[in-house]
Image (cartoon, rainbow, N blue to C red):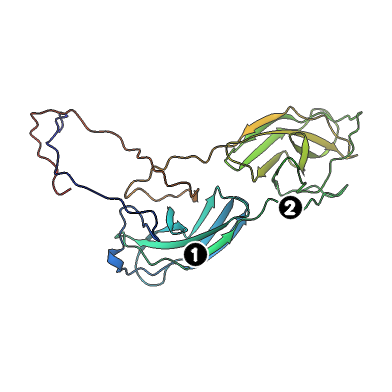
């Protein structure tokens, strides 16, 4: 009550949760009307982009006049996310691994469509060929995987010669931005002085992993919750190298996130999700009030 008095308890209800060994667990609060639905299944599910740790799916809306409120995405039959759009990016995947997905539409009355045609996708591998060649052009795609301690150059080599008499100053203020579970973006300032800079080399634990003409670089394919050390060296027009920048240590974020989904929870619109484990935590606030024995409030009915 408004004075925090409590009613007598309702009649007790016993509930047995279903097994996880099912094909379709559906969405909390969403039923399929006993198998009867007027919504058609999503069509033409496609893979728009595949990378070592992510996949981007798209599909077409169901045919017919039934109003669609959104879509559920299923991984091996288990629902992992919802969206209002007809495109979704799934992150936190493992390289060179096959995943199977389906899509189901749901209507304004919470009815579910039949599942779409199943699609299987295999993430790309991190094992790439070292294409480094002396004096080759600098890479401008701004993305590379440092790999294992044996580092392969995913970009062309502009390391230059390690001239001890270099007149180029070292890059300054190396900063880690947009640190995520599998990627990090580094930025830095150009060296002081008048020496002309042709580009920059990026080093992981002292080994060169990439080159760029810009003062910003994104490194992908990292492991969650792992520390990495990077430094930057400038390259002159005569291939001379600057001293290394101050080393920066970056720890990627963990994939251990809290699932706050509740029945009828709002649809996720950030278009990104990790399938995760099936451990769910309830983040519901407590309004239990005081246990007043003289309560005038009736107990809840029909639990």
Residue 146 marker: none
Residue that carries the numbered disc 1 in the rendered image: 59
Image coordinates for residue 268, horizontal then vertical, percent: 43, 49
Residue depicted at x 46% and y 62%: 102
Quarter residue 186 falls in: top right
- Kind of element beneath mark 2: loop
Residue 101 to residue 258: above or below: below
Label 1 crowd (10 A; few <14 / some 14-19 / many >=20): some
Q: Quadrant of the N terminus?
A: top left
Sequence-wise, the earlier of marks 1 and 2 is 1
Image side of residue 284 versus residue 225, left or right: left
80 in relation to 164, above or below: below
Q: Position of residue 105 (x, y in %)?
A: 39, 62
Q: Nearer the viewer, residue 195 or 5?
A: 5
| Side of 134 relative to 93 (left or right) | right
Label placed on residue 128: 2
Left or right: 113, with 240 as reference point: left
Q: Label 1 vs label 2: CA separation?
A: 30 Å
Q: Secondary structure at mark 1?
A: strand
Task: Give the residue displayed 30% in from the left and 53% down from the top.
Answer: 29
């Amino acid at each position: 009550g408004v004075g925090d008095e409590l009613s007598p308890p309702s009649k007790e209800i016993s509930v047995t949760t279903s097994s996880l060994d099912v094909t379709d667990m559906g969405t909390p609060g969403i039923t399929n009307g006993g198998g009867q639905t007027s919504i058609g299944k999503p069509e033409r599910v496609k893979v728009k982009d595949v990378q070592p740790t992510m996949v981007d799916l798209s599909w077409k809306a169901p045919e017919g006049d039934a109003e669609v409120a959104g879509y559920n995405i299923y991984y091996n039959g288990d629902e992992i996310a919802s969206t209002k759009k007809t495109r979704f990016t799934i992150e936190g995947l493992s390289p060179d691994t096959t995943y199977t997905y389906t899509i189901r539409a749901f209507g304004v009355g919470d009815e579910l469509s039949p599942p779409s045609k199943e699609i299987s996708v295999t993430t790309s591998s991190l094992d790439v060929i070292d294409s480094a060649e002396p004096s080759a052009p600098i890479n401008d795609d701004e993305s590379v995987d440092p790999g294992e301690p044996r580092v392969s150059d995913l970009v062309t080599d502009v390391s230059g010669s390690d001239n001890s008499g270099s007149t180029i100053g070292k890059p300054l203020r190396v900063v880690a931005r947009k640190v995520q579970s599998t990627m990090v973006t580094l930025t830095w300032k150009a060296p002081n002085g008048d020496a002309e800079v042709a580009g920059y080399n990026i080093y992981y634990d002292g080994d060169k992993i990439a080159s760029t003409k810009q003062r910003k670089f994104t490194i992908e394919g990292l492991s969650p919750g792992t520390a990495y050390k990077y430094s930057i060296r400038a390259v002159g027009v005569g291939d001379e190298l600057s001293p290394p920048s101050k080393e920066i240590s970056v720890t990627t974020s963990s994939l251990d996130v809290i699932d706050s989904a509740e029945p009828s929870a709002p649809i996720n619109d950030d278009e990104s999700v990790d399938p995760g484990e099936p451990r769910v935590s309830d983040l519901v606030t407590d309004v239990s009030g005081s246990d007043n024995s003289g309560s005038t409030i009736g107990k809840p009915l029909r639990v």
